[in-house]
Image: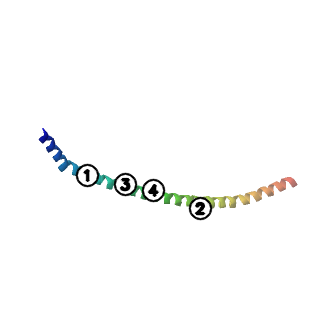
Amino acid sequence: MSDIVTGVRDAIQDFVAPALKAQAVKLEALQRQSEIQHDAVMKTLDAFRAEMRAEFAALRANNQVEVFRQISPIGERIAVVESRTKNG
């Protein structure tokens, strides 16, 4: 019985253990690669967010300028109409 146990133990150490170690090394390498890719994607997303925020801020500023440009003449017209109705 002892010979069978020793034989199985030797077979595991000779064949299974090296294969398991190789798989563990591959898994660790894949995990590191995945972390690196995740970090790269997150940096890309952060840069994209910053770019979008800048674009939206610029659009908001342009829209405000355009709104003021269009509202100003309307305000003047309203003031003229109000002055005429008070005088008339």
The residue most toward the front is 2
Q: CA distance from mark 3 to mark 4?
A: 12 Å
Vertical comparison of 3 with 87: above or below: above
Left or right, 57 with reference to 46:
right
Viewer-side residue, 8 vs 45: 8
Question: Which type of secondary structure does the marked residue at label 1 adopt?
Answer: helix
Pointer 3 local density, CA inside 10 Å: few below 14, some 14–19, many at least 20? few
Determine which of the numbered discs, if any, sits on residue 58 in the image: 2
Indicate the amino acid at tag 1.
Lys
Residue 61 can be seen in this image: yes
Q: Earlier in the sequence, mark 4 or mark 1?
A: 1
Residue 46 lies, in percent from the top left, at 49, 58
Question: Which type of secondary structure does the marked residue at label 2 adopt?
Answer: helix
Q: CA distance from mark 3 to mark 2?
A: 36 Å
In the rendered structure, are the residues bearing label 2 and label 4 in contact, judged by CB atoms less than 8 Å apart?
no
- Which residue is under mark 4? 42
Residue 71 lies, in percent from the top left, at 71, 58
Q: Nearer the viewer, mark 4 or mark 1?
A: 1
Determine which of the numbered discs, if any, sits on residue 34 in the image: 3
- Which residue is under mark 1? 21
Q: Residue at x 59, y 59 (%)?
A: 57
Q: Residue at x 46, y 59 (%)?
A: 43
Indicate the amino acid at tag 4.
Met
In the rendered structure, are the residues bearing label 3 and label 1 in contact, judged by CB atoms less than 8 Å apart?
no
Q: Earlier in the sequence, mark 3 or mark 4?
A: 3
The residue most toward the top is 1
